[in-house]
């Protein structure tokens, strides 16, 4: 089985969100199952020099982008037994950052065509192309309409994973005709047209052989108008080929029993967590008291993460005996809010704007409650990481949060965290106070912590399901008709 992952970001090379973690971790598990898995992504300026120095240029060719023939270099690097290909073009990718440029439509049109043109250059024609998010959305469409007529391309199948339906890649009509060279007949509501523009994500939803989401609950949610981002009609038509497969985390990277960043502990002996809490309180100049619960947030500071709920009832939250730590960056509104709260509650609240992996692990390891009240959450990794470090998640029942967090039930003494259903600030506040009440019963709390730490969120189960999907697709004689 030959599979090509096409992504716009991937750890350890470059990252802006959870997509990069998936691209860096899932292929390792797929390889362990015997899949010939390779990964292709743009060669960005921001990729660390230590990786660039290891890259070897293997091909040069030109890619048609409208009336121009644009240079494309393919560079190769092997890591952990997996081949990575990097699409090199300094005009498009030698810039600060990855996204948000006026010509993103052109940049990722070039990338899409470069990927498809590269097969004959790198001597690797996959059975399955697995594309991720809107940046690669045109690849399944181009494969079906333009490239499947070429020798060697006719049996390639495509899988497209929706990591976040909110981001769709919407561009002027000219991107379709002038840059991608797609015939004007496809610019209609049943095809690529989207309110007078072209929509890269819509192209993938229409043309891919299989669609996946990153959690089973999110798969069901996006079939509704509330979560569907105007794509629910297409998704309903394709729900037979729409599968929800829960993301995992790299449990060797997030492992409190054997890493240098924290005092070691595990589910059988959680005494080390007390040392981590003591360290965290000292680090942030908070009162050192093992009985004071630490509530933490490590998050993008955006409305998606439910921060307007926290903003609404924050003063009521501070009425409890608690310490509150925030690590993240995002919208100015929420950055300023948390800064202001740290001034208003100097004995309780600490805020760090930015992100640091070492500090994040120290906060996970030293905190008691991990707050993640998202408005929507396709999968979410924070709640899974938090449980690895014995911080109990407090979440809203949406997307992957619903699939991974079982709210503690006092009657049967089961659960691995706390949750609330409605997107309502006072429902969150009630659940928050309930968690802090249970925290006072240390024996009960420690049992929940131990249970949470034993949860298996590794990539092994996910990889097995993806491999089954690839095999089923590769056995088909025909592609999806649209």
Image: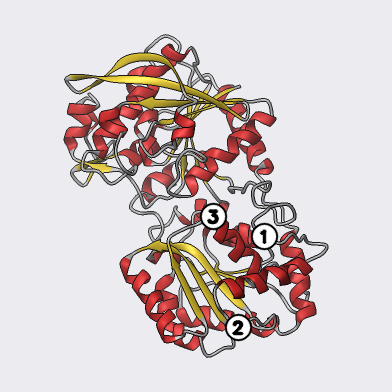
* Residue 341 seen anywhere in this rendered image of the structure: yes
Residue 208 spot, x, y in % from top left: 43, 32
Q: Which of 383 and 212 is in front in this view?
A: 383
Circle number at residue 60: none
Task: Look at 52% across and 83% down and name the residue there.
Answer: 348
* Residue 209 seen anywhere in this rendered image of the structure: no
Residue 390 spot, x, y in % from top left: 69, 65
Measure the alpha-carbon separation of dots 2 and 1.
20 Å
Task: Look at 64% across and 48% down and name the residue there.
Answer: 253
Q: Which of 81 and 203 is in front in this view?
A: 81
Q: Is mark 2 on a helix, strand or loop?
A: loop
Residue 44 spot, x, y in % from top left: 37, 35
- Against 262, residue 134 (above or below) is above
Circle number at residue 357: 3
Q: Mark 2 points at which residue?
A: 287
Q: In which quarter of the image is the C terminus?
A: top left
Q: Which of 91 and 108 is in front in this view?
A: 91
Q: Which of marks 2 and 3 is in front?
A: 2
Quarter where residue 476 is shown: top right
What crowding class fits label 2: few (fewer than 14 Cα within 10 Å), some (14-19), or many (20 or more)?
Answer: few
Colouring scheme, one of rainbow, by chain, secondary structure, one colour = secondary structure
Q: Which of 354 and 475 is in front in this view?
A: 354
Q: Are marks 3 and 1 in contact (CB under 8 Å)?
A: no
Q: Is residue 399 left or right of residue 87?
A: right
- Against 181, residue 320 (above or below) is below
Q: Mark 1 points at which residue?
A: 262
**In this view, which residue lies farthest toward the bottom?**
319
């Amino acid at each position: 089985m030959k599979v090509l992952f096409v992504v716009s970001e991937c750890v350890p090379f470059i990252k802006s969100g959870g997509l990069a973690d998936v691209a860096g971790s899932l292929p390792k598990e797929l390889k362990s199952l015997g899949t010939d898995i390779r990964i292709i992504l743009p060669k960005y300026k921001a990729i660390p020099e230590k990786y660039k120095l290891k890259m070897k240029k293997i091909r040069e060719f030109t890619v048609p982008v409208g009336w121009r023939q644009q240079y494309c270099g393919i560079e190769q690097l092997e890591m952990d037994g997996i081949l990575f290909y990097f699409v090199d073009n300094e005009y498009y990718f030698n810039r600060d950052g990855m996204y948000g440029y006026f010509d993103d439509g052109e940049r990722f049109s070039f990338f899409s065509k470069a990927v498809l043109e590269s097969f004959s250059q790198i001597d690797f024609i996959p059975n399955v192309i697995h594309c991720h998010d809107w940046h690669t959305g045109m690849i399944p469409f181009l494969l079906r309409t333009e490239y499947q007529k070429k020798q060697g391309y006719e049996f390639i199948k495509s899988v497209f994973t929706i990591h976040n339906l909110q981001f769709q890649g919407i561009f002027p009509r000219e991107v379709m005709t002038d840059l991608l060279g797609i015939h004007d007949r496809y610019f209609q509501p049943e095809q690529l047209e989207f309110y007078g523009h072209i929509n890269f994500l819509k192209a993938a939803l229409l043309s891919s052989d299989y669609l996946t989401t990153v959690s089973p609950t999110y798969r069901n949610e996006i079939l509704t108008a509330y979560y569907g981002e105007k794509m629910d009609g297409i998704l309903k038509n394709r729900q037979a080929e729409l599968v929800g497969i829960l993301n995992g985390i790299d449990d060797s990277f997030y492992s409190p029993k054997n890493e240098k960043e924290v005092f070691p502990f595990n589910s059988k002996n959680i005494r080390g967590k007390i040392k981590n809490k003591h360290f965290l309180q000292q680090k942030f100049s908070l009162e050192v008291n093992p009985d004071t619960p630490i509530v933490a947030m490590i998050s993008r500071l955006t409305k998606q993460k439910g921060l307007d709920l926290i903003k609404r009832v924050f003063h009521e939250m501070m009425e409890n005996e608690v310490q509150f730590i925030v690590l993240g960056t995002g919208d100015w509104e929420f950055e300023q809010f948390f800064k202001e709260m740290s001034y208003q509650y100097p004995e309780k609240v600490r805020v760090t704007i930015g992100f640091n992996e070492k500090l994040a692990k120290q906060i996970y390891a030293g905190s008691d409650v991990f707050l993640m009240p998202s408005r929507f959450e396709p999968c979410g990794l924070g709640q899974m990481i938090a449980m690895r470090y014995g911080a109990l998640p407090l979440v809203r029942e949406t997307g992957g949060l619903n699939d991974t967090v079982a709210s503690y039930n006092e009657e049967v003494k089961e659960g691995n965290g706390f949750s609330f259903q409605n997107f309502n600030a006072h429902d969150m506040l009630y659940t928050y106070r309930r968690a802090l009440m249970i925290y006072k019963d240390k024996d009960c709390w420690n049992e929940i912590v131990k249970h949470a730490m034993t949860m298996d969120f590794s990539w092994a189960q996910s990889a097995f399901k993806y491999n089954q999907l690839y095999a089923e697709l590769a056995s088909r004689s025909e592609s999806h008709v649209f």
